[in-house]
Image: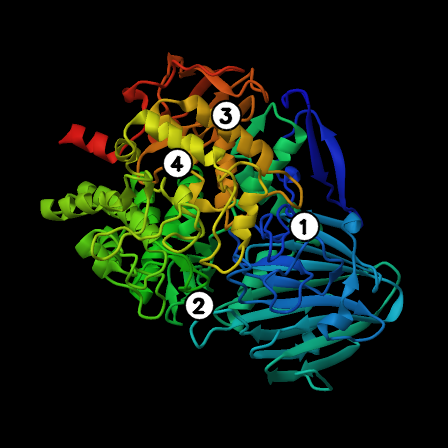
Amino acid sequence: MRNKSVLILALAFTLGLSSKTASATTHADSFDPVEYVNPLVGTQSSFELSTGNTYPAIALPWGMNFWMPQTGKMGDGWAYVYTANKIRGFKQTHQPSPWINDYGQFAIMPVTGQPEFDQDKRASWFSHKAEIAKPYYYRAYLAEHDVVTEITPTERAAMFRFTFPQTDSSYVVIDALDKGSYIKILPEQNKIIGYTTKNSGGVPANFKNYFVVIFDKPFTYEYTFADGSLKNEKEQQANHVGAVIGFKTGKGEKVHAKVASSFISFDQAELNLKELGNNSFDEVAAKGKQAWNQVLGKVQVEGGSLDQYRTFYSCMYRSLLFPRKFYEIDARGNVVHYSPYNGEVLPGYMYTDTGFWDTFRCLFPFVNLMFPSVGKQMQEGLINTYKESGFFPEWASPGHRGCMVGNNSASILVDAYMKGVKVDDLKTLYEGLIHGTENVHPKVSSTGRLGHEYYNKLGYVPYDVKINENAARTLEYAYDDWCIYQLAKDLKRPKKEIELFAKRAMNYKNLFDKESKLMRGRNQDGTFQSPFSPLKWGDAFTEGNSWHYTWSVFHDPQGLIDLMGGKQGFITMLDSVFSVPPIFDDSYYGGVIHEIREMQIMNMGNYAHGNQPIQHMIYMYNYAGEPWKAQYWLREVMNRMYTCQADGYCGDEDNGQTSAWYVFSALGFYPVCPGTDEYVMGAPLFKKATITFENGNKLVINAPENNDANRYIESMTFNGKNYTKNYVKHFDLLKGGVIDMKMSDTPNKNRGVNPEDFPYSFSVNEKKKR
């Protein structure tokens, strides 16, 4: 495709008359990034094999509520899969992952002929050929009911537009789902109110999601359901309730429904409904499109193929969904939230639905770089979480959830602080970080530090004390301790305290096995686990093996290089990840988990990009003076493991982490070690990228010779000065300017090879300062 400055192919949503829908338009001088986004990327997934495990989130950036077409049965984590052929309803969802499942959910479904409430009986065949999915707009044709359903969202509300056939029996089902629900029809107001309590954990006993639905057409049919029985009553409370309202419609008649919800009260749901104002459906959609273009437009890429644009902006869209807002605006305009930790309504921000084990790596650094004002709200929300529960979260949905390992809230908080995204209450922040190093949540063992007693005494979590995934915990705790060290030093804490965390930051060395040159579980008596297979998934590690986790020394790659015998030994081990066949030992799990299968089928050796532990590994070539190998393999991963189709990922997308990896990598740099002020260099995917920071400054990255063959950096200048370093600094980027790269089809093996060109390593940089 020609340079995008000459020709931009954009899909434009045509707004105006209510009968208009999306259409393809060519613009020579417009920039419309949201039209490159495909929300269906990653939806061709299953329990056995993930190509993203996503669903089409029809939402605004970081919106409190998402909407989605529901193909799966009630309670199924795989609520929308591309291979399905029936829609059961259109669901308000807060699901961050099929493995975590959903909460605060209810469904709306138009039907004709009979007032069917049962999810299977009301389901309708549909086709992707008659489906339009945009972040701000969704449309599907329900063939068995001859109804077109359209949805457009705000942050806490949405508008539906149903186009019915000519019939005396048009209906809309409101399904409050099971596990305890309430519904009431208010016919004089064309209104239905209700609440749902259905959740998969992480909520207090008083949890409810209150909703309100208002139609623009009077009801001629008003019935409720309670536990499978049709009732001629206006109000129901039972395990599973819902409402069916109906009316006579003419051919092509459009009926609108305004919907909003609240975790606080019915009154607050009514306030949230005001987000729609007096806008028409098309006006709401236009505002939604504008909201997405405002955030996606902060990065403009040029000089790529159409599929590359689609992949880039689809990934950026996924990077702007989680963590979601869990706060609301009360009648006085104050920011308030229902606490998923203690059940109270309290002042201040709250964000949720993210797992830090995944997202500390580059999702949160992306927010800190591009959207620091939003990042500060997220950080203030974390302070509130600590105040309300006694712990920072590690996996929240909406409250503490038992999932994954590590104490990576330390990374999330410290990276933001070091990037200038600072909370007001630093005293509480530091107190909470220290508390997390010495405690574990009494009910959720993945929150705090499981095994902290052993770790703080021995310098590692032993293999033989019945704490699973102990080596993974040790490696992540050591990095997290380095993060705390960084903050303690900046806050000028007592020297003894600073030195304690500096010492613990080196605990990764306690697991290094000189024989295999890999990380290995270690017993309480100091001996290594035996037998040891570096290809064994799980056991001492988390959803990976030793080949994947050995590189989890984000803060001190030079220390790892030294353990491996120097740069050449380190490079050989990096190379081996790609040359070791994709063989595995799945005995810990008793079968092949999807993460293993995704590694096996990608034809890239034992490199397992479909899961997070190894996603930074390619960038580590920069620390040993061979940046051209990083440039080669990064392009391979972008080309081979990401697409803009329904099977577009090579594993779980995971709340924006795997997407943000692509966004960073396509721009040419990546935050290997959150908590530093550095990004490690790769090489850009596009001929040009223009980044507009929140401070108004622009950074232009030029690589005019870039193409699939010319993937190597021959030379680089930053604001006109020759630049040989294998990293760029955060605050230098924020000043804006121009990076010019000359690209080549052969590696420049004389650039970035000197120690002064290498990125930060704790054991090197801190020695220089002392």
Tag 2 residue: 202
| Circle nearer the viewer, 3 or 4 | 3
**Alpha carbon of mark 3 to alpha carbon of mark 4: how far?**
18 Å
Which one is earlier in the sequence, the residue at label 4 or at label 2?
A: 2
Residue 272 falls in which quadrant of the image? bottom right
Q: Residue tagged by mark 3? A: 632
Q: Which residue corresponds to mark 1? A: 137
Residue 293 picture quarter = top right
Where does the image place residue 408, in percent across and percent down from the top left?
34, 51
Please report whichever mark, 1 or 4, sits nearer to the chain's N-terminal start.
1
Q: Is residue 716 visible?
A: yes
* Of labels 3 and 1, the one closer to you: 3
Describe the element under mark 1 as helix, strand or loop.
strand
| First along the sequence among labels 3 and 1 | 1
Q: Quadrant of the N terminus?
A: top right
Looking at the picture, how far across and down is residue 395, in whole percent? 41, 58
* Image vertical order of residue 221 relative to residue 211, above or below: below
Packing grade of label 3 (10 A; few <14, some 14-19, many >=20) is some
Residue 696 percent location from the top left of the image:
44, 31
Disc 1 versus disc 4: nearer the observer: 4
Position of 501 with respect to 511 (left or right) is: left
Color style of the picture: rainbow
Q: What secondary structure is marked by label 3?
A: helix
Q: Distance between the residues labelled 2 and 3?
A: 43 Å
Q: How far apart are marks 1 and 4 (CA)?
A: 33 Å
Q: Position of residue 499 (x, y in %)?
A: 14, 44
Left or right: 209 in relation to 493: right
Determine the secondary structure under disc 2.
Answer: loop
